[in-house]
Amino acid sequence: MKTKAAILRSSGQDWQVVELELDPPKANEVLIRFVAAGLCHSDEHLRTGDLPARYPIVGGHEGAGIIEQVGPGVTRVKPGDHVVCSFIPSCGRCRWCSTGRQNLCDLGATILDGSLPDQTFRFHADGEDVGAMCMLGTFSQWSVISEYSCVPVDPDLPLEKAVLVGCGVPTGWGSAVYAAGVRPGDTVVIYGIGGIGINAVQGARHAGAKNVVAVDPVAFKREKAEELGATHSVASAQEAQDLVTQLTLGVGAEHAIVTVGVVGEEVVEAAFNVIGKGGTVTITGLGGLAEKTVHLSGTILTLFEKRVQGTLFGSANPIYDIRKMLDLYRAGQVKLDELVTNTYRLEQINQGYQDLLDGKNIRGVLIHEH
């Protein structure tokens, strides 16, 4: 069958909307009709080349849709199911899945290669194989994906909002609640209030932090952070340092969470300096793969027993936590509607990413037309 999709032919180029050939699903695969896709910064990293990928590739790793067809052996979903896709597949059998760390599933090893678990491709153009970001390619109207990327959700949930729990919401929320382990009374500083950082704010508030300090140069994002749970917001790392020194009487924060769009040495150092003894820096954002962005005093690390850690998917378990985020949404404890700043058609994808870079969006959502 044919599908319309946004692809990158190489790094440094804009997205191109083209028509592709799509193969039918094979064993343990499904055909999905995407309803919505989130415009996440990780796909911008594909465009800039910060993340190495095999080109050409269909973008999009945050997606929600309806299962139209299943291949042999599929047991996780059936035709007609509404699903949110996890950008980290979860096989349920590997060492990591079986020990409760689905976010590190071995099937995730090829998510930037764009192939499915059998290392073959379902998208094609003029006889050339086209990959799919995170084995999904949610910037396509239709896709063939692994059943291990599917999380069934209740059919009454609005997919254009539920789509956000495929990446941004659990990644940010989990960065605070799971990875950082924020506890009641803590002081938390969050650097970068985009689609991940705003949910780290929600997670820190949910965990009972006394002070949640949002750091972002864009006034609109600081205002949104305070709407969703930040107790304070500032425009710069230096302002955050001064404020935390005042709030904690010089002790420092328990946690700093780095969720800026492009992680660099300066923001990591600022996060390291803002935490006190026994504090933790959690790095969720990405930078250039070849760049060394953590340059810190090992002596201070030792003498103050500070910790620096990374987290993928907020250290959450996709099969469990995607549904959990939606349960919290129903209960009014996690906000989704308020995160969607603008919606776009597929043909407007480059405008959507320009709005992201210009600081106009907390999260843009692409709505597919069929």
Image (cartoon, helix red, strand yellow):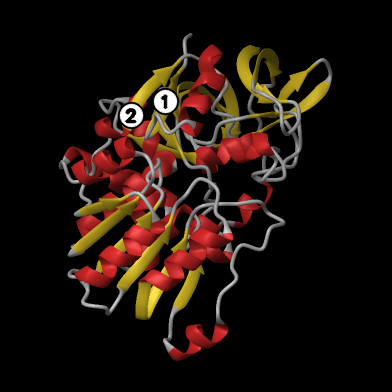
Image position, residue 176 (x, y; %): 34, 60
Residue 64 in the figure: left or right of residue 221: right
Let me know if residue 29 appears in the view.
Answer: no
Say which residue label 1 marks: 365
Which residue type does callout 1 highlight?
Answer: Val
Earlier along the polypeptide chain: callout 2 or callout 1? Answer: 2
Say above or below: 259 vs 27. Answer: below
Question: Are discs 2 and 1 less than 8 Å apart at CB?
Answer: yes
Which residue type does callout 2 highlight?
Answer: Val
Q: Secondary structure at mark 1?
A: strand
Q: Pick whichever, 17 or 277, lies toward us.
A: 277
Image position, residue 329 (x, y; %): 22, 40
Residue 39 in the figure: left or right of residue 47: left
Image position, residue 315 (x, y; %): 44, 60
Say which residue label 2 marks: 340
Residue 17 in the figure: left or right of residue 75: right
Image position, residue 335 (x, y; %): 24, 39
Residue 41 in the figure: left or right of residue 21: left
Q: Residue at x 52, y 26 (%)?
A: 354
Most extreme residue toward the right, as rendered?
127
Q: Secondary structure at mark 2?
A: strand
- Picture quadrant of residue 2: top right
Say above or below: 87 vs 281. Answer: above
